[in-house]
Amino acid sequence: MSYRKPLIGFSLFALVSVLVTWVVWSTLQRTIPGDTDNYSATFSDAYGLHPGDDVRMAGVRVGRVQTVALDKDHNARVTFKVQRNQAVFTNTRAMIRYQNLIGQRYVALALGKGEANRLPDNGAIPLRAADGAFQTEPSFDVSALLGGFEPLFSALKPDQINSLSNTLILALQGDNVSLSTFISQAAAVAGEFQQRDQILGDVITNLSSVVNGLAARGGELDTLVTRTTDLVTGLHDQGQLLLHSTEQVASAAGSVASMLGQVQSQLRDAQNSSTAAFNLLIANGPRLDQAALDLPMLLLGLSHLTENGAYANAYACELDISLYGALLPRGVLPNIMNLLIGDHHSEVCR
């Protein structure tokens, strides 16, 4: 019995398995291309951040988190790698941000105010800067905010939960809907007065810890408001540029309309001429078809006429005249000639 074929098959299977495993491992590792530098940052809270999460600058992935551990002061010390061509400075601020709706986080690096030197390899971003201001922003558990409304959601129907969730989203986005409106709407959908009172009491109790947390993060909210102001200012400036571009497009459209009006009459004449030419071709279609059949015979006769060189040599063996059926049908004249003089031809014609 030969073991050669099974051995070759098993070797190929093992090779493919190793390659697939290496591809999956490389994908999960999400390595950083090029040379990298190591840094660390201290956060008061790194909830939800894990090794392998992204490190981004202006939303672009430039590194990955290496470790998340507790230091001697019971703060979270995060080490991460950043591409060497992306500079990190001594005033760079590190912030833990939400990456998606499933709760995954990433570390965002942003340049601080004032002049600063480049942070060397293995450098650290402290919890507070020299002036006492926070240089890092910790993670925030949004699930605590949503969990505060759990007693309310448990007493409602699915369509009522969808309506209240939409109102809550608008309230958090500040779209002319306040949190008090949400609570009033929640109380209105309760079945009984006692149930309303119990629901509101549970919601207020659960949200008290969330409000305390938001109060402690006043500095971060101030940063959010400042950045929102910058965003609105930038949108206003872009709006002015868009208005100017719209005016230019409107002017160009007016010029094109005027040009089309000038050439419209010429285009109409050209269209009429083309239509008349096509109609003439269609009307004379049968005659053109007959001419296409007769032309090869005419050219063949001319070739026989001039085949002897510089002089023409022609023999009239048979004569058939027909003006496209208008005077004589085809074949009528030869039949008449045969009846009159008989079917006699010279030797050349025979």
Image: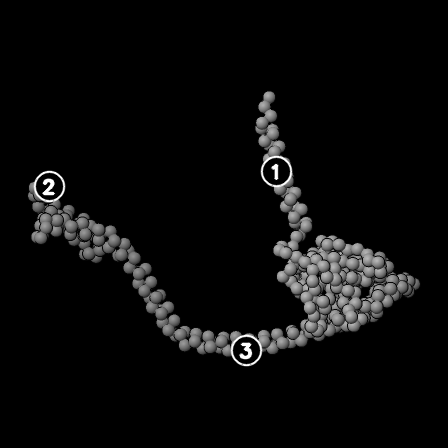
Labelled pair 2, 1 in contact (Cβ < 8 Å): no
- Viewer-nearest of discs 1 and 3: 1
Residue nearest the viewer, comparing 292 with 18: 18
To which residue does mark 3 refer? 247
The relative height of residue 26 versus residue 184 in the rendered view (above or below) is above
Q: Residue furthest right?
A: 194
| Pointer 1 or 3: first along the chain | 1
Q: Quadrant of residue 48?
A: bottom right
Q: Secondary structure at mark 3?
A: helix
The Cα–Cα distance between marks 1 and 3, rounded to whole angstroms, is 64 Å
Q: Quadrant of residue 192?
A: bottom right
- Residue displayed at 81% across by 62% down: 44
To which residue does mark 2 refer? 350
| Pointer 2 or 1: first along the chain | 1
Spot occupied by residue 290 in the image (x, y as percentages of width and height): 25, 53
Is residue 328 among what the camera can see? no
| Pointer 2 or 3: first along the chain | 3
Q: Secondary structure at mark 2?
A: loop
Q: Amino acid at mark 3?
A: Glu
Q: Amino acid at mark 2?
A: Arg
The Cα–Cα distance between marks 2 and 1, rounded to whole angstroms, is 88 Å
Is residue 24 among what the camera can see? yes
Q: Which mark is residue 220?
A: none
Residue nearest the viewer, comparing 153 with 273: 153
Q: Amino acid at mark 1?
A: Leu
- Residue displayed at 84% across by 58% down: 72
98 sits to left or right of 187: left
The Cα–Cα distance between marks 2 and 3, rounded to whole angstroms, is 88 Å
